Amino acid sequence: MNKKPLILVTNDDGITAPGLRTLIEVMNTIGDVVVVAPDSPQSGMGHAITVNSTLYVENVEIDDNKQIEYSCSGTPADCVKLAVKQILDRRPDICVSGINHGSNSSINVIYSGTMSAALEAGIEGIPAIGFSLCDYNWGANFEACKGFVKTITENVLKNGLPKGVVLNVNIPNLPKEDIKGIKVCRQAKANWEEEFDKRQNPNGRDYYWLAGKFVNLDEGEDTDEWALEHGYVSLVPVQFDLTAHHCIQNLNTWNLND
Amino acid sequence: MNKKPLILVTNDDGITAPGLRTLIEVMNTIGDVVVVAPDSPQSGMGHAITVNSTLYVENVEIDDNKQIEYSCSGTPADCVKLAVKQILDRRPDICVSGINHGSNSSINVIYSGTMSAALEAGIEGIPAIGFSLCDYNWGANFEACKGFVKTITENVLKNGLPKGVVLNVNIPNLPKEDIKGIKVCRQAKANWEEEFDKRQNPNGRDYYWLAGKFVNLDEGEDTDEWALEHGYVSLVPVQFDLTAHHCIQNLNTWNLND
């Protein structure tokens, strides 16, 4: 009888991304790996799903390793839905997403395709983790990630995760020896101060690029931003019940039904 | 001195959607209205933002009413960012999104472009509300929505909203006289049981449509699904701190740093 866990691997940078290849390499040491990942980069896709157009899936072979791989025309959330409902013949024991090229800490979790895949798996009741390296370069060095990715994945396989919760793991862009360990955190109250870069196209029409800088005004030492700035891997438990339960009592004092 | 509130209006069904036109009509009775909405439907876009392509914005005139309108090539979240950072010359007092053609109750909040616009405004510190009517038809009747939309918007303008919280309002598809009132709720623990409809294109290539049915297994009488099923407008306070704070203590017992 096969005792190896079935591991679903996906990402948002696309099936050829070096971060995904590193994640597959680590997962091949833990279990049986099936990859269902977007055929092109999907960064900033948030929790988008494809409702008004068609989805294509192709069985592909990218390298000589033992995983099975599918390339999908949809978003990261689509990949997870297709994997669970259409491609896999049994439920995966875990879903891992990433390793993202770039941070998904603090408010970035909201915009993250990497985390949307993990959340989608969580909604399906599958333990799930999103991994990100704080380096946006395609040629980022993922070596230092491997040990942390393995440790966290094995812990989730062993301990499970509470219902309705997935993990958001961010890894600082540091050599392995300079990373101090893994720290359980809360999401920092940080945000982007956007600026739009206004340009003119060759036909004289104005267009904009989204730009801006990340600003963290949260001084808490229990946040993911603090952890990353101080050389730790941040691990934030993330939920998809978005209810602000603490506000319900106050809202009930409003004159909504006069 | 102008005492009228500045109201930013957006949606995810596109700038010509009847639900948006109804929302504009109501907002014109409350304040000065600026519309920045997608030039085409964006349903299921979640919290997508446009990071790898260009954004176009055009000043447009859709009807003879007094609002100012801009059509944008981006997602609902892009529309809010562009409005706040580029188009408006002062901060809006409130942002309203919708009225969506179709429910955004329970887990649908995660996939909702309507709510992503409201959340984006919330991240910017602007009080925000997403409105949805539980009728997916383009020709849906929005008459019964008007009074509830006005009441809730005026309450938010008067009372403000706690930092980090926006409102998700869903309106049942019933005649006005059958709607019992507004009920403050939590997000129901419901989800979609997806099925993929597999077809073949004229060239013989397989493709899929996402389909499925909505399943609510949450029997709580304090949920948005309960409210809607029982003829109430549901109002859920929604937050963008996704931290599952209740799990942090347990995760700290794991062997993450051995």
Image (spheres, coloured by chain):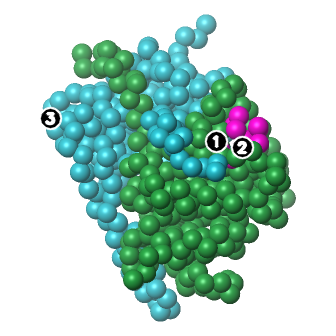
Chain colours: A cyan, B green
Front residue of B75/B87: it is B87
Residue A4 among those drawn in magenta: no
Identified at 44% across, 27% down, the residue is A27
Q: Which residue is mark 2?
A: B232
The label on residue B16 is none
The reply to whether residue A69 is in sight is no
Dot 3 amino acid type: Asp
Quadrant for residue A183, please give it. top left
Which residue lies at the image location 40% right of the left edge and 23% below the top edge?
Answer: B247
- Residues at circles 2 and 1 in contact by the CB criterion of under 8 Å: yes
Q: Read off the chain for label 2.
A: B
Residue at 63% in and 86% down: B61
Residue denoted by label 1: B183
Decide whether residue B227 is among the magenta residues. Answer: yes
Q: Chain of mark 3?
A: A
* Furthest residue toward bottom: A204
User: Secondary structure beneath disc 3?
Assistant: helix
Residue B77 x, y percent position in the rendering:
50, 61
Q: CA distance from mark 2 to mark 1?
A: 6 Å
User: Which residue in the protein does label 3 denote?
Assistant: A178
Q: Earlier in the sequence, mark 2 or mark 1?
A: 1
Q: Quadrant of the N terminus of chain B?
A: bottom left
The image quarter containing residue A193 is bottom left
- What's drawn in magenta, residue-wise? B225-234
Q: Amino acid at mark 1?
A: Lys
Q: Chain of mark 1?
A: B
